[in-house]
């Protein structure tokens, strides 16, 4: 079974169980300032997991594209991925443990035909704060699972959340498949690598309060996830996801242009294939390489791919390797539309890094001369310091392995342990600096970010009034301090245009206009003049937020929230920066004072 077949079977199965299909949305979260990327299908559903009513009802299903960056350094083995697709189904305060476990089991055993004797499960064993999840284990036992195939594990393995310090959380129950070629063991051991996790049912049963205590959640939710790539590999009898048809065309292209075989070069080829695929999707959702945030992650992925390409004798190769990605994922229409721009961004970043590589090597040579003396030929006994090695990494993208390799060529040692100390010091500083952004988690629906989200609606409307109706939103990012708004426009805004936009918005704020919402079909929403420029496969119902009404209508958009009730709550709107985001896309940063 291939990728498209698995996705189709999954979505159709849950539709028959009364679920509505929802959009596969952008990798750039619209309403969650706590993460750089959409890392799971639940991210676009944050307001609904917290109790807001979803226009498509309580039972939902979709496939969602995701990026996870915490494992970038792990990519290179047979299973870790940066970009992946996640199949998910949700119950927002409706069905509970028995139903979701039975659905999971039915899909795996009946629809996919996986032999039951190759499956095992884990449940939460409980601790001093939360009771043991015997409810889930009894459902599994009722489906025929022997006690040897049901393991009780701790928080590290069978607990989800909260995403921040407070909010919804709960145990999960995971399903494992015996993927090894050897005989299936009678007893399930989670430490045995032969068992591969293929499904996770998260049971949002509790809420963690500011006091650290757990109380029963006001709305109990089900959030499930099944990785497409890993499941396809299992169904194709593979122990390496890079051998499945989700990756094979990319691997074959790397083999062809490098003249090397996959066998013996697995790590380099896996890293190139994974990182290039992830980069295609990230650029496809409007990100360009840069030094902060999503742009920095993108830059790191491209440059790491370039470095590993160098090991295979490749240079200026990213565009060729990226080409099969568009064929594998031809069902993502936005990739096809943006293909030219995506390839241009990847090519430009590769060229920049190739120039940086040369500069970095020159810097290394300067370091060698400085510590050994210009005329000295005897470099033994001298050492590149950890600080200098880290400088090469931070400023020129040189990994420690490359610095060590250069040192070997020059017969000079490198203080790699000093490099690690510098790296850890930098990580701690980064962590401290990012704490405010990443600490709040799922429950971060604070008043400041709610105000700024509402302000994006006013900004969108004002831009269209001042610059013309062809302006379309291309993305947004909101923290508790500022909003960032990307929109289609082909030139820099004048000072006069910026002032007009600010004046328009502040005029609306001063009029103390009510903000209202109503539920309607997508067709009705578009007929009414509501904006919705993201190309989503909207469900049967959508929420439309209006600022004003009748002749006094200023803004009307399809949106998921959160919003304030009246414009008077906003304060003064101020644009602090207007710049280019990518070709044909401008970016505004603004604050409320």
Image: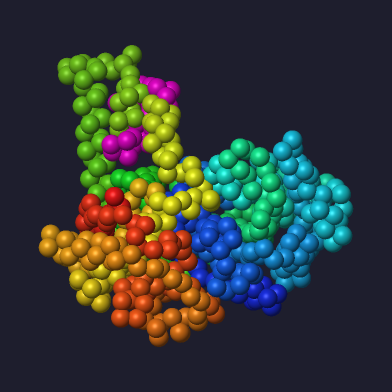
Q: State yes or no: residue 477 in magenta.
A: no
Whether residue 528 appears in this view of the structure is yes
Say how the picture is coloured.
rainbow
How far across and down, in percent of the image, does residue 379 sit?
28, 18
Q: Position of residue 117 (x, y in %)?
A: 82, 58
Q: Which residue is found at the position 30% from the left and 62% from the top? A: 509
Q: Report whether residue 306 is seen.
A: no
Classify 22 as above or below 224.
Answer: below
Residue 292 falls left or right of residue 213: left
Give the number of callouts.
0
- Is residue 367 rendered to the left or right of residue 42? left
For the residue pair 473 and 528, the one nearer the viewer reads as 528
Left or right of residue 357: residue 476: right
Q: Is residue 551 above or below residue 475?
A: below
* Quarter of the N terminus within the rendering: bottom right
Residue 39 versus residue 24 in the image, above or below: above
The image shows residue 281, relative to residue 419, as above or below, that is below
| In the foreground, 350 or 449 | 449
The residue that appears at 23% across and 31% down in the rendered structure is 363
Q: Residue at x 46, y 55 (%)?
A: 32
- The image shows residue 257 at horizontal and vertical percentages of 38, 58
Q: Is residue 26 left or right of residue 370?
A: right
Magenta-highlighted residues: 393-421
Q: Quadrant of residue 469?
A: bottom left
**Residue drawn at (61%, 43%), measured in percent from left and top?**
209
Give coordinates of residue 545: x percent, y percent. 42, 71
């Amino acid at each position: 079974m291939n990728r498209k077949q698995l996705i189709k079977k999954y979505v159709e199965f849950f539709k028959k169980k009364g679920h509505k299909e929802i959009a596969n949305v952008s990798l750039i979260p619209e309403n969650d300032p706590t993460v750089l990327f959409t890392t799971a299908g639940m991210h676009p559903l944050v307001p609904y997991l917290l109790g807001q009513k979803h226009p498509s009802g309580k039972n939902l299903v979709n496939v969602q594209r995701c990026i996870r960056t915490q494992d970038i350094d792990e990519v290179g083995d047979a299973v870790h991925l940066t970009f992946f697709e996640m199949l998910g189904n949700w119950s927002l305060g409706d069905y509970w443990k028995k139903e979701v476990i039975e659905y999971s089991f039915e899909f795996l055993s009946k629809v996919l035909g996986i032999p039951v004797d190759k499956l095992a499960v884990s449940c939460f064993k409980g601790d001093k704060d939360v009771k043991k999840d015997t409810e889930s284990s009894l459902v599994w036992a009722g489906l025929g699972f022997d006690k040897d195939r049901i393991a009780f594990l701790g928080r590290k393995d069978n607990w989800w959340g909260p995403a921040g310090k407070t909010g919804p959380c709960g145990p999960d129950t995971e399903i494992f498949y015996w993927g090894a070629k050897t005989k299936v063991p009678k007893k399930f051991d989670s430490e045995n690598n032969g068992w591969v996790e293929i499904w996770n049912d998260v049971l949002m049963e509790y809420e963690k309060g500011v006091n650290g205590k757990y109380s029963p959640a006001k709305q109990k939710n089900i959030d499930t996830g099944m990785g497409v790539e890993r499941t396809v590999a299992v169904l194709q009898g593979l122990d390496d996801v890079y051998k499945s048809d989700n990756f094979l065309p990319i691997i074959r292209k790397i083999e062809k242009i490098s003249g090397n075989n996959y066998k013996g070069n697995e790590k380099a080829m896996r890293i190139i294939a994974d990182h290039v695929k992830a980069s295609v999707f990230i650029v496809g959702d409007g990100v360009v390489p840069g030094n902060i945030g999503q742009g920095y992650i993108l830059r790191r992925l491209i440059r790491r791919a370039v470095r590993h390409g160098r090991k295979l004798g490749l240079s200026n190769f990213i565009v060729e390797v990226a080409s099969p990605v568009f064929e594998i994922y031809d069902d993502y229409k936005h990739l096809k539309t943006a293909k030219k721009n995506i390839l241009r961004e990847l090519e430009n970043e590769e060229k920049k890094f190739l120039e940086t590589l040369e500069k970095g090597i020159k810097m290394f040579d300067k370091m060698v001369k400085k510590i050994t003396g210009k005329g000295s030929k005897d470099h033994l006994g001298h050492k590149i310091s950890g600080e200098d090695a880290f400088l090469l990494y931070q400023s020129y993208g040189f990994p420690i392995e490359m610095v060590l390799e250069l040192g070997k060529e020059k017969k000079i040692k490198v203080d790699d342990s000093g490099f690690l100390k510098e790296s850890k010091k930098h990580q701690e500083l980064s962590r401290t600096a990012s704490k405010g952004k990443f600490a709040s988690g799922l429950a971060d629906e604070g008043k400041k970010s709610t105000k700024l989200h509402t302000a994006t609606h006013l900004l969108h409307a004002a831009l269209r009034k001042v610059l013309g109706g062809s302006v379309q939103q291309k993305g947004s990012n909101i923290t508790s301090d500022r909003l960032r708004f990307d929109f289609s426009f082909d030139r820099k805004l004048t000072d006069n245009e910026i002032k007009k936009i600010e004046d328009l918005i502040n005029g609306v704020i001063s009029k103390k206009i009510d903000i209202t919402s109503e539920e309607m079909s997508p067709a009705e929403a578009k007929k009414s003049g509501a904006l919705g420029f993201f190309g989503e496969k909207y469900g049967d119902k959508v929420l439309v937020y209006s600022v004003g009404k009748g002749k006094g209508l200023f803004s009307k958009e399809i949106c998921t929230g959160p919003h304030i009730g009246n414009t008077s709550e906003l304060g003064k709107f101020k644009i602090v920066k207007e710049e280019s985001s990518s070709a044909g896309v401008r970016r505004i940063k603004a604050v409320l004072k």
